Image (tube, rainbow, N blue to C red):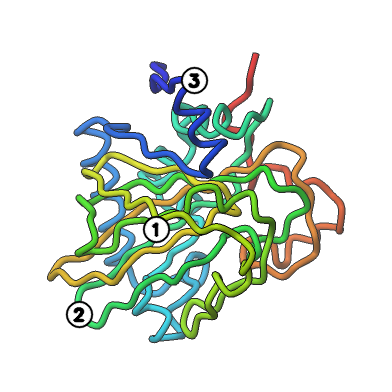
Amino acid sequence: MTYYPLSEQQIAFFRENGFVQLDNVLSAEELDALRRAADEVLSQRYDARIETSSTNPEYEKVFVQKVNLWRVHEGIRRYTLSKRIAEIARRLIGAQRIRLWHDHLLTKMPGDSKPSPWHQDRPYWPMIGYDQLSCWMALDDVDENNGCMQFIPGSHLWGELEPINLVTPQDIFALVPDKEVKPPYIARMKAGSCTFHHGLTFHYAGANRTDRPRRAMVTIYMADGTAYSGKPHVVTDGLGLQVGEPIAGDLFPVLAEGE
């Protein structure tokens, strides 16, 4: 396996700013395979194992979300369980071992599209501890016209805030009136490039104003030892986890480990 040439400067940038953009992470062949897999999933009929938003049309204007595709589609599985990409996550967050939390395909459909409002990810997750980060892999070229990611530098250092309603959002900046908010970083990228962002980083994606879907494959990683808080979540509901117990096992495999 050939590892992505992640530099110490990129690691330092991530830890200071809460995000980093990495270009040309996937080869043309890998990108083509992942696109085909994503399109197969999008064309399938409703599947309760992976659907989270199909009962709320307003939510789907923000994005169509399908969760834990690695459990039901072999093509997605090959991508999600990639040790090469997990090793990037492990080095960025500084963990000895990194586990999969879950994957999800986020698609902004053309037409009546709405922005993904400014929010943090971590408040939605049933976790104790803060060593989590997401890889947002562009399956299409992205810019402001179709909903590329945007980040507020340094916002991951402001602590965990209340979860934002993605359909009728609160103003997250009103929750940090004492902070100096830097201008957002706009992550314009070619397909096959990605961003990684910390679970506490403020981020946003605009509406898709084009005539084509904007597809992104998101893989979320957590440091080994991250514990269960008891908060309801579609990924952990019904698993019988106990509060304070590490989130582990076959459904949350270790994907990368330091020497």
Against 95, residue 58 (above or below) is: below
For residue 228, what is the image quadrant? bottom right
Question: Quarter holding the N terminus?
Answer: top left
Q: CA distance from mark 2 to mark 3?
A: 42 Å
* Disc 3 to disc 1: CB gap under 8 Å: no
For residue 96, what is the image quadrant? top right
In this rendering, the label closer to the viewer, 3 or 1: 3
Give the percent coordinates (x, y) of residue 240.
80, 61
Amino acid carrying mark 2 in the image: Gly
In this rendering, the label closer to the viewer, 2 or 3: 3
**Which residue corresponds to mark 3?**
8
Against 51, residue 92 (above or below) is: above
Question: What secondary structure is marked by label 3?
Answer: helix
Q: Residues within 10 Å of mark 3 (few under 14, many from 20)?
A: few
Amino acid carrying mark 1 in the image: Leu
Question: What secondary structure is marked by label 1?
Answer: strand
Residue closest to the eye, 238 or 154: 154
- Which label is found at residue 111? 2
Residue closest to the eye, 256 or 141: 141
